[in-house]
Image (cartoon, rainbow, N blue to C red):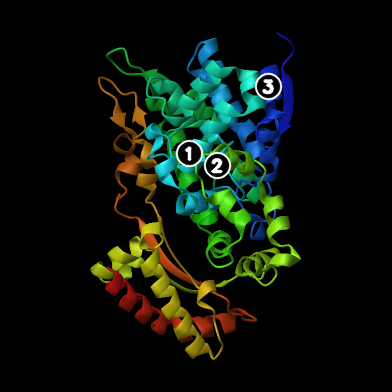
Amino acid sequence: MGKPFQVRDAVHGFISLTDKQVRLINTPVFQRLRGIRQLALANLVYPGALHTRFDHSLGVCHVARLMAEQLRLDKSETRLVRLAALLHDLGHGPFSHVSENALEIYGDRSKLPADQKKDKIHEVITGHIIRHDRDVSAILGKETSAEIADLLADGRKQRVLRAIISGPLDADKQDYLLRDSHFCGVPYGHYDLHQLLRSFVLAGGNGSKELMIDPNGLHALEQYVLAKYYLTTNVYRHRVRLITDQMLTRAIMLGIEEDGILELKHLYRFDNSDAFFKNYCRWDDAHFFCFFCQDKFRKMFCHRLLDRLLKRNLLKQVFSERILSFAPRVREALLGLSKPENRKMRDGVEAALAQTLSTRLGTKIDKRFVIVNAFDIKSVRTTSRNDEGSVMVATDPEPRAFEEESDLFRSINESNTTAFVEVYAPVEWSDHAERDRLRKRVNKPILDVIKAVSKEGA
C-alpha cells in the first residue's frame, strides 16, 4: 500500500485518503459537489458560508475513520464505512435541501423502486449513482457499489456501520456542526469532537452490539447536543436563511407551474429513468443561476425571483407569530401548512394575504410572491435523538437513554417545541423604524386572514 494522500482541511487539519478514495473523489459525479453549497444561500447573511458538499463529504469520511478506529472495527468494515461516508451526498441537487423539497413536490413517487417507496428521493438518487455511475462502479466494482448503496439506504444487517452513517451520533452531524460553525463564523456549533469520540463504545447483549456512550462521556454528549440545538436556532432557522430557501423553492415552483420551463421540469420531475439521472448530474448551483437567469427567461416569474436573490433584494418578513398563540383548530392547520398535501390551503392564505397587503399598503402585490412559511424548532431534548432514536448510555446493568441519564436533559420539558408561522412579501422599507411601522400596520389584518382561511382549510 502506498503512502496515504493527504488533503488540508479547514476544520480537521490533514485528512488522509486512500488511493481508491482519491480516484472516487476525482470522478465527475463527485467533483460536481464542489459546486453545491452546504447551506445554499446562507452566505447572504453569513458571508463566509461558501463551503460545499465536496469538503463536507471529505470531512464525514475523516470522522467516520476516527469512529471506526475508536470502535476497533476490522479493516473491511472500516473500508466500507469510509466509502459510504465519502459518497453519502452524491444525490444532492442545486442548493442542497432546496432541491430535496422540489424533488418531493414534483417527483413521481410511484416510480420509486418497490423497496424504497418511503425513502427520500434524493437518497434514492444517491444509491442509483453509486450503483450505476460508470466511473464509480468501475472503481468500486458492482458488489461493493451495491453494498455501499444498501448501507446508505437501510443497513439493518450492519447496525454499527449504519449508526456511523445515519444516526443521532453519525459522522455527518459531527462534521457539519463544526464545519457550518467555522464557515459561518459563529461559535454555536462548537463541541469537543475528540472527547466525544473517546466516549464511543460498542455495548449490548444477546450478541448484538450497538454504538453507545460511556457514562464518563455524558458531558461531551451534552455539549454536542446543545451545539446542534444552538446552530439550528441561530443559523438554520435564521430569518434570511429561511427567506432565501423559500424564494428558491418558489422560483422553482413558478418556473414549472406558471412559466412551463422544460429544463426545470426535467430537473425535478423524478421518474427513475436513465435520462433523468444523466440530466440531474449535470446541475449545480452556478449552472442553475446561469441558465435560469438568461435574458430569454427575463419576463418569467422564476427569473424575477432569482434576480432578486442575485441582487440580494429579498422578500421581507412582514409577519411572524408563534403558532401556539392561535386557537387549537387553527394551530393544527398551521402546523401542516407548508406540507405539499396542504398546497390548496396555503395558496388560499397567500392569495388572501396579497389582497390584504395590497389594500393596506396602497400598492399592487402579486400573490405569487407572497409566501407563508410554517416551521418548528424542536426542543433541545427532542434534538438529542431526532428521528433515529435515543442515544444509549452504556450503564450497568442495563443501558439507559441519554436524556434520562443526563441530569441536565432530564430536567428539560420535551414539549417545549417552538413553532412559527411567518409571511414574506415583496415590500420595501428604508430603516428599522419604517419596518416596525409597516409590520404594526399589517399585523392584525394578517392575523385575521390566517385565522379565517386556516380555519376553513381545517
Contact between marks 2 and 1 (CB within 8 A): the answer is yes
Of callouts 2 and 1, which one flags the residue occurring earlier in the amino acid sequence? 2
Note whether 314 is above or below 366 in the view shown.
above
Cα distance in 3D space between marks 3 and 2? 22 Å
For label 3, the crowd category at 10 Å Cα-Cα, with few meaning under 14, some 14 to 19 and many 20 or more, is: some
Residue type (three-letter) at the residue carrying disc 2: Leu
Query: The N terminus lies in which quarter of the figure?
Result: top right
Q: Residue at x 37, y 80 (%)?
A: 449
**Where residue 312 sits: x, y (%)?**
68, 67
Position of 455 with respect to 38 (left or right) is left
First in sequence: mark 1 vs mark 3: 3
Q: Is residue 130 above or below residue 225?
A: above
Q: Amino acid at mark 1?
A: Tyr
| Residue identifier under label 3 | 17
Find disc 1 in the rendering and name its residue: 224
Q: Secondary structure at mark 2?
A: helix
Mark 3 or mark 2, earlier in chain: 3
The foreground one among 215 and 418 is 418
- Spatial CA span between label 1 and label 3: 26 Å
Give the x, y percent position of residue 5: 74, 20
